[in-house]
Amino acid sequence: MNVRRTLVRSSLVLASLSVLYSAACTEALYPPRPAQLPGPALADPPTSRINMHLSLTESGIKQLIEATVPVGGEVPFSFLGQRKLVWKRTPAELRFNNAGGSLGIKATIQAEAQLPGASPTFTINLYAEAQPALASDYVALLQSPTVQISSDDRLLRAAEWSAGVLSSLKDQVETKLRELRIDLRPVLQASYLKLAQPVSFPVGTAKGCFRLGLQSIEAGPLVIAGGLEKDLSVQVAPSVTLPCTNEIGAAVGAQSLPPLHNVASVPTGASDVIVPIAATYEELQKAMSQAFTNGKLFFDPDMPDLYLEKPEIYASGGEVVTKVHLNGFVKKGLTLSIAGDLYMHGHPQVNDNHIEVPDLEPTIETKNALLKIKATIDGDKMRRKIREALRLDIGARLQSVRQKLANDTTVKQKVNNGPEGCVRADVGRVEISGIFAHDAYLRLYAKANIRTAAYLPCP
């Protein structure tokens, strides 16, 4: 009997211990941490072109000619002593010849000869023709102007002094046309200096900046059609700096426009400009933490006591690595405490102005660790919840690119103390064309569609 009682008691003790053990056990998951391997070398984005249409309207050219060519004057001549011809012209009329590549200027001159005992008046016809051109120093000029002076007045044609007078008048007008210069550098320089200034944007607690480095400006053939039309192509080399440095802004003042290259053809119409911007992994981590409630991310309603915490994000081999700590317990007939670190990796993408990692998957080591508790945890729910939390809004950064291109390419500037010229820009869609997990930060390429034009005078 004593032996039987002892066996029964031992069995009860063992059963109690078994129940207690099965009611509260612990599972620890600690796969190895992925090393922070260097990613592939990242080159700067390709150079971009900003196409600009330059338009010198008939009205603008008229204003410059009126301000350059005198509206009247005197021509001395000898006839029974020293005499003079006082003249005054009508406003210039312009004629455009695209086939001949020339600009014609027509005016009528009313002249009065101061002669002994009389002051006869004459009507003189003025016609000038020249080839407009844009030189490498951004100065528009009239090449090889030729001036014709004629009159149907019989008295003037018969006067012995008329040949010298008309020749002197021709030389006066021809000299002024040859001296005509339309300096477009101030308008383009003002626009370029604004573009050259770096634009800062917040990157976590730091500041990054991007700038458009101008490389060259090319000009296509001149089109003469109711005015002077010319297409320019500005080549820029965008770059990004993190953090933003003051040295970049200090160097802008010393920069100037490169010489203008006249070429056979240039691209026309709207153009796409690639602008690099950046985001840090600390920003991603902070954005992900905002999806946590009191520092905890609950991923399965069926397991309310199991949660993720302490997110950490870094780069490895060109991928984004996310570390989260799994903590809590589940009850399925027994209480199972679970604790450990989980690592997931994937490639960043931009969707609807948000950085996401849609292909985020556990590392091989993490998958093997999760197999131990596969029957306890729904890995798909956990992965889906982490993907949803890992999301960073970069809309403000894209808006800064739009404002930079729109505002800084729009300027107004007086030309030759005459009409006001201006450069205007119309920025269309801005979208991300590429994103790369750099070792220190995420690098993004924003592609902006932009159309620019320069006008004289400003409409």
Image: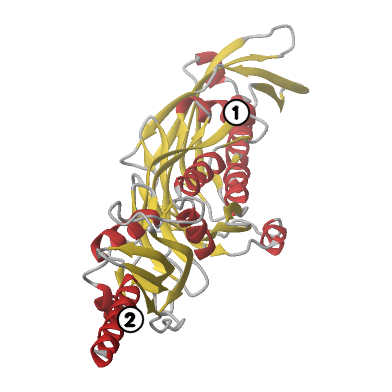
> Looking at the image, is 41 positioned above or below residue 275?
below
Residue count near mark 2 (Cα–Cα under 10 Å), binned few <14, some 14–19, many ≥20 = few
How far across and how far down the image is residue 372, in percent?
A: 26, 78
Classify residue 304 by image quadrant.
Answer: bottom left
Is residue 264 in view?
A: no
> Looking at the image, is 429 positioned above or below residue 255?
above
**Disc 2, SS:** helix
Q: Nearer the viewer, residue 324 or 176?
A: 324
* Mark in the foreground, 1 or 2: 2
Amino acid type of disc 1?
Pro
How far across and how far down the image is residue 371, in percent?
A: 24, 77
Q: Nearer the viewer, residue 359 or 133?
A: 359
Which residue lies most toward the top here?
117
How far across and how far down the image is residue 139, in percent?
A: 57, 47
Name the residue located 29 percent from the left edge and 70 percent from the top edge: 361
- Whichever of callouts 1 and 2 sits on the residue coming sooner in the sequence is 2
In the displayed structure, does residue 71 sit left or right of residue 157?
right
- Residue designated by label 1: 419
Q: Nearer the viewer, residue 131 or 24?
A: 24
Is residue 89 in view?
A: yes
Name the residue located 48 percent from the left edge and 51 percent from the top edge: 290
- Residue designated by label 2: 13
Which residue lies most toward the right here?
81
Name the residue located 38 percent from the left edge and 55 percent from the top edge: 298
Image quadrant occupied by the N terminus: bottom left
